[in-house]
Amino acid sequence: MDAIFESLYLEPDNFNIIRSELTRPEIRILQFPMNSSLKKVDDLLQMFGPKDKIPDNDLLPTLIYSGSRNATGQVLKVVNEARGSCGGENNPHGTLIRCYHAVTGKLDKVDIIGGFKGAKFPCILCTMVLGLGQNWSRVRRVIAIGRADPSNICQMIGRCGRDGKPGLAILFMEKKRKGGKNKAEDFSSSDKRTDDLRMDALAITPVCLRICFSIDNLLGYIPRSPEDANVSRERLREESKGFLACKCSNCQPKEAKLLRKHISQMTSENFVSMCENASDLEDIDDVVPKKKGNIRGNNNIELIPILSNLSERLIANFAHFFCSQFSKSSSFVPSDLFDQEDADAISKSLDKIQDSSCLNKCIGGEKLSGQSEMLYGLVKNFLEGDDYQNHLAKLATYNQHIEREMQRLLREKQEAVDRKAQSEKDKQNEAEERRRIAANKKRAIDLDKVNKVKQKELDKVEKEKKASEKKEADVIAKQKKAEEKKNKDIESKRKAEEMKLEKEVKKKKER
């Protein structure tokens, strides 16, 4: 706001600023990473069902925002391919989609806006040029392609649900932007709040997208973490306002994936029920419509002789047909209407030509009345002729031979693979056996060491035991010897006393 006042040389005191609620809870925001490039935009193939199942007037009223005017042509082509109406992008009065950008003429812009309001067609492919001053209640879905300034995206998705009913915003973000930040690790807290940073942050943030746009509108940045204090404050504010729980792709990722798989089945009638009951949708495989290939053959393929003969017959027969149509001299020749390239295109596309209309697509349309029928009749006779049937028989035989050779080579390859696998298995077994023997040997050595240690301990104990027994025996022997000596001394003393007594008795007798 300060920057606006400064750039316009305005004084804030001269204005009354009225603030209102910017959050649109009725809009469900689904953000998907693109599987294709911005140049191809093949992700749009999932957004639209085939026209044979859903008529144009039953499609959701949709605004598709392209990042640049140059990309609108490819978007038109992809949308028409998804609907099964290839070439519809060249119809300026189609009932599917119209293009609105800066180069669109003034009268065309009036016709497009009036036609969309009048439900003459359900889709508008546009740039940011469309939207200013428009307040359409009819828009139910907005598709934005590629990364962009979050404030611009907020304006884009704000075009849907203007009547208060549910709206669907689909944001396709390229996975990698050249020179941009493409994963959370690329950001740092010191980054300045630039427009590029906001744009890249929106593509990778896990935060509720509704809260992201609200914070960006109020504070000028995209939060990258649910732990951001402003995220908590905004969530509490929404709860206090009574907003319904958000169902964006970050808040309800499973429902977003289911909606993406079923979104091609959406119509004006089932839109609300599918959005409100997305969790009840069946989890099916992603189905992307296949692009229809060009019926015209590859110009780089060299014709085999039999097809070269067909080309020559086509050119010769067309020359006769031309002469029958123009009996007098004319300012052009047969090759101006049907040349060698056209004849070769037919010869290269025989398997795709089912009728004269297919042949017309192959040569770019009929130049003379009856030309297609004449050429198709010639092609049909050629296909049913003996020469071509013999060629097919030889080709079938050759293909069978090739198939047998392929099977043989595959068997040999498989046998070689099996031999190699068996050899690897044998090597592994040998290595395992060597490891087992080494392990057993190591265990035996370790066990022998343990036994030696135990034996050494036993010998030590036995030696100590013997030493102890010897010591005890020595003590006992000493004690016994001492006892014998004591007894001997006692006996000697006793004998000495007896002898003394005998001497005394003898002396007494002598007296």
Image (cartoon, grey):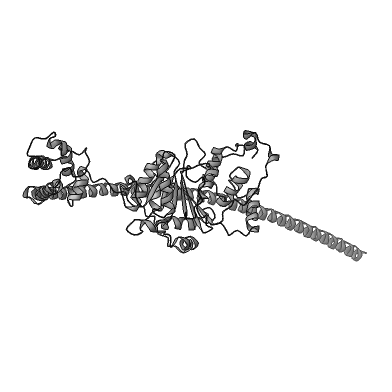
Determine if residue 467 is in view.
yes
107 vs 89, nearest the viewer: 107
Q: Is residue 109 left or right of residue 226?
A: left
The quarter of the displayed image where residue 37 is located = top left
Residue 109, quarter of the rendered image: top left
Point out the image quarter for the N terminus.
top right
Q: In screen coordinates, is 458 left or right of 122?
A: right
**Residue 386: image location, x then y, percent:** 6, 50
Task: Locate the C terminus by quadrant.
Answer: bottom right
Q: How many marks on residues?
A: 0
Compared to 459, does 146 lie above or below? above
- Which residue is at a point 50% across and 48% down the rendered structure image? 134
Left or right of residue 89: residue 139: right
Residue at (71% x, 40% y) in the render: 13
Q: Is residue 208 visible?
A: no
Q: Where is residue 246 drawn, in percent x and y?
A: 56, 56
Q: Compared with residue 24, is residue 297 higher up or lower down, i.e. above or below? A: above
Q: Residue at 62% of width from left, 60% of height from top?
A: 242
Residue 26 position within the rendered picture, expressed as x and y whole percent measured from the top left: 54, 57
Looking at the rendering, which quadrant does residue 150 occupy? Answer: top right
Spot the residue most to the right: 511
Residue 339 position, x and y percent, is 15, 37
In this rendered view, identify the residue nearer to me: 72 or 97: 97
Q: Nearer the viewer, residue 310 or 391?
A: 310
